[in-house]
């Protein structure tokens, strides 16, 4: 199975570096959307390091505003997202983020591919996309379609009209 490279896709060896390198004191950190191309499922997470923290905190996107609709889920410890008792994210979203981040980061750290076939023969393909910016208005892009296109849905609609 071969997936095509998209401009917003992180190469496997850059995924952990990207997630663990938000600038200290940055409230917004860096945002990554992890996409399962086979199922169409995705989870958007933000990695941040508040001032004075050595740990990377992980927020999960819980609404439709990709600038501000994030809720704290836990702390990144190596390749594992440790859910916090102080998490503000809904339990289902936090558990999904943990499962996706743990699976993806463990595979990346071990050098295992993010695409191939499961033991039962069904294919899988996972992409890690860093946030993009709309080429027209500069708004943050987090959906795979918008990142691949480089233009958000509102601007794309205006261009098509």
Image (cartoon, rainbow, N blue to C red):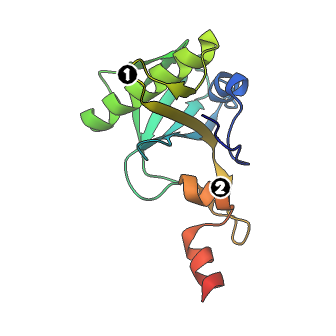
The residue sitting at 36% across, 21% down in the picture is 83
| Residue 57 marker | none
The residue sitting at 71% across, 43% down in the picture is 5
Among numbered discs 2 and 1, the one appearing first in the sequence: 1
Direction bottom: furthest residue: 161
Which residue does the numbered mark 2 point to in the structure image?
148
- Please say if 32 is above or below 110: below
> What secondary structure is marked by label 2?
helix
Of the 4 image quadrants, the one containing the N terminus is top right
- Image coords of residue 26 (percent x, y): 64, 37
- Depth check: give the residue in front, 41 or 81: 41
- Depth check: give the residue in front, 153 or 37: 37
Mark 2 in CB contact with mark 1 (< 8 angstroms): no
> What secondary structure is marked by label 1?
loop
Which residue does the numbered mark 1 point to in the structure image?
120
Q: Residues within 10 Å of mark 1 (few under 14, many from 20)?
A: few
Q: Is residue 142 visible?
A: no
Q: CA distance from mark 2 to mark 1?
A: 30 Å
Q: Is residue 109 left or right of residue 94?
A: right
- Image coords of residue 68 (percent x, y): 48, 52
Quarter of the view holding residue 145: bottom right
């Amino acid at each position: 199975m071969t997936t095509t490279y998209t401009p917003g896709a992180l190469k496997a060896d850059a995924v952990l570096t990207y997630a663990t390198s938000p600038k200290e004191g940055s409230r917004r950190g860096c945002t990554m959307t992890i996409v399962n191309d086979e199922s169409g499922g995705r989870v958007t997470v933000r990695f941040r390091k508040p001032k004075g923290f050595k740990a990377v905190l992980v927020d999960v996107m819980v609404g439709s505003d990709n600038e501000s609709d994030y809720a704290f889920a836990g702390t990144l410890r190596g390749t594992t997202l440790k859910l916090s008792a102080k998490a503000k994210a809904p339990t289902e979203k936090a558990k999904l983020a943990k499962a996706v981040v743990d699976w993806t980061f463990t595979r990346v750290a071990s050098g295992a591919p993010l695409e191939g076939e499961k033991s039962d023969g069904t294919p899988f393909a996972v992409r890690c996309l860093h946030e993009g910016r709309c080429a027209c208005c500069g708004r943050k892009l987090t959906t795979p379609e918008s990142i691949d296109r480089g233009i958000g849905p509102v601007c794309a609609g205006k261009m098509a009209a």
